[in-house]
Image: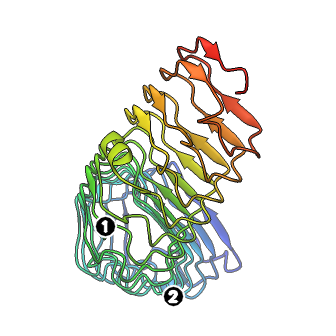
Amino acid sequence: MHQLQPYVSLETLDLTSNSISELRVGSFPSMQLKYLNLSNNRISLLEPGCFENISSSLLVLRLNRNRLVALPSKVFKLPHLQLLEMKRNKIKIVDSLTFKGLESLKSLKMQRNGITKLMDGAFFGLNNIEELELEHNNLTEVNKVWLYGLRMLRILQISHNAIGIIRPDAWEFCQKLEELDLSHNHLTRLEETAFVGLGFLETLNLGENSISHLGEGVFSDLANLRTLDIRNNEISWAIEDSIAVFDGMKKLNTLEMKRNKIKIVDSLTFKGLESLKSLKMQRNGITKLMDGAFFGLNNIEELELEHNNLTEVNKVWLYGLRMLRILQISHNAIGIIRPDA
């Protein structure tokens, strides 16, 4: 503390890549510090009160690449902090009320910690948080008990976890979500309740899971969705046997469906997607496009069907695609282009 006392006007302090192992009470003198970077040290201990003398001014705190295993309660009494980063530590459990005292926080980033458990109310008190990044951890489900109180949340990144369950009322407190990334998880089923309440959602990434079941009307609440990525799953059964599985997404612009083992595209598959501009269905093994397979896609501009098993181009499956600008059908088995195609 005494070494920093002469710098009462200091606003930015970068102590990255040193050998700091602990922060105790009195580590900082009373000063107007706004930006503090302690990344890439050896910090394993944060003593409650260690930030007390800079609590009235600190806006950004970075603690990435340290050795934190646990976060003591009441350690983050930083009422003006807006960004907190703790990537690449060793935090396995986040206890209830860990972040109480961070009422101004806008963004929390905790990627690559190996987090297995978020206790009830783990993020309670983050009344103004807009962005929560939890990628590359070991979370197994999404439920409302750890999302409790996050009413202002707009962006939730939980890709590369082990999530297999989305609880029916998971989004009760997060109904302002605009971006949700659930890619690279263990999802096999999406029940009809999976996205209830997410009427403001604009971007949804479900790619790289093992989804084979889509509940009836699972996307019907997503009236504002612009982008849906469901690449590399196993939704062939849901697409081939269900009617209008995407109905309800009237503002959807981009639909990504690569590598889903879809063999047949029915005439009602894309019903209700009148705003769609880009459809990507590469590497599915599609053998048949039924008459009017893309009928109703009145605004589609780009259709990508490379690496499938189509044998001909004809007007019956191209019917209605008057706004189409780009058609990609390379790497198929096309031997015939019909005269009126």
Residue 154 against residue 341 in the figure, above or below: below
Q: Is residue 309 left or right of residue 162?
A: right
Q: In the displayed image of the protein, which residue is found farthest to the top?
A: 335
Residue 322 against residue 330 in the figure, above or below: below
Residue 284 against residue 80 in the figure, above or below: above
Residue 282 place in picture, x, y as percent = 52, 30
Residue 178 place in picture, x, y as percent = 55, 70
Residue marked by disc 2:
79
Q: Is residue 200 left or right of residue 285?
A: right
Judging depth in this view, the residue of 67 and 301 nearest the camera is 301
* For marks 1 and 2 on the same chain, the one whose residue lies earlier in the sequence: 2
- At label 1, which amino acid type do we have? Glu
Q: Is residue 202 visible?
A: yes
Residue marked by disc 1:
192
| Count of number-bearing discs | 2
Residue 284 place in picture, x, y as percent = 44, 30
Q: Residue at x 47, y 58 (%)?
A: 246
Q: Quadrant of residue 67?
A: bottom left
Residue 279 place in picture, x, y as percent = 59, 43
